[in-house]
Image (cartoon, rainbow, N blue to C red):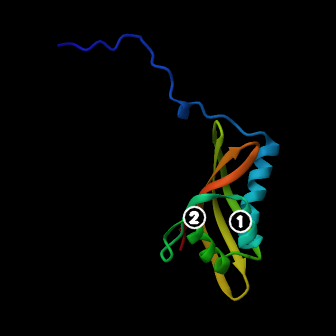
Amino acid sequence: MTVSTGNARTPPHAAHKSGTLSPREQGVLWDLEEHFWTSGADNARATTATNAVMVFPYPPGILQGDQIWTHLRETTGWRSVVMAERRVMRCRDIAVLTYRVSAEKADVPIYKALCASTYLNDDDSWLRISHQQTAVT
């Protein structure tokens, strides 16, 4: 039996229709991301979806919902962060930020990681739905 591939095209999947963010939208997202690191757990919680998922180097590992805030109360409030190799991808109401971070605070070695945060545009407001860090040694 022969299967014909023909020239029939299937409609492209939505994931193949990536778009761009305006410079203003990119600025909003990068500001949210920087404040996630520097403004403490309360600010991070205000810009994060209720049942978000975050992955940190072990421990603590994979956290979801309220588990996140116990961990972040102890680990946010970095004095300064530098985000390099920034990339942004958008697909409809979802944007993914990826970057290399170097974060600094008193009495702690400089923390370096590869990071990705996913945001959902919900009623014209961006909310973080996931965040992931891979420590770089």
Name above or below for residue 2 compared with residue 23.
Answer: above
Q: State the residue at coordinates (73%, 62%).
A: 46
Location of residue 8 by image quarter: top left
The amino acid marked with disc number 1 is: Ala
Q: Nearer the viewer, residue 64 or 33?
A: 64
Query: Element under label 1?
Result: helix
Q: In the visual, does 79 lie left or right of 2?
A: right
Helix, strand or loop at disc 2? loop
Residue 15: quadrant of the picture: top right
Number of numbered callouts drawn? 2
Label of residue 65 in the image: 2
Give percent across and percent down for residue 109. 64, 83
Q: Is residue 109 above or below residue 80?
A: below
**Image quarter in which the N terminus is found:** top left
Residue found 77% across the figure and 70% down from its top: 39
The answer to whether the residues at label 1 and label 2 have Cβ atoms under 8 Å apart is: no
Q: Residues within 10 Å of mark 1 (few under 14, many from 20)?
A: many
For the residue pair 132 and 123, the one nearer the viewer reads as: 123
User: Eyeballing the image, is 27 above or below 17?
Assistant: below
Numbered circle sitting on residue 75? none
Q: For the residue carrying disc 2, how many other residues have a C-alpha within 10 Å: few (<14), some (14-19), or many (20+)? A: some
Q: Point out residue 38 in the picture as x, y percentages from the top left corner.
A: 75, 71
The extreme bottom residue here reads 107
- Identify the residue at horizontal 73%, vertical 40% (top origin): 21
Q: Amino acid at mark 2?
A: Gly
- Which residue is at 70% across, 44% downward? 122
Earlier sequence position, callout 1 versus callout 2? 1
Say if 61 sits above or below 85 in the image: below
Tell me the residue that label 1 is attached to: 44
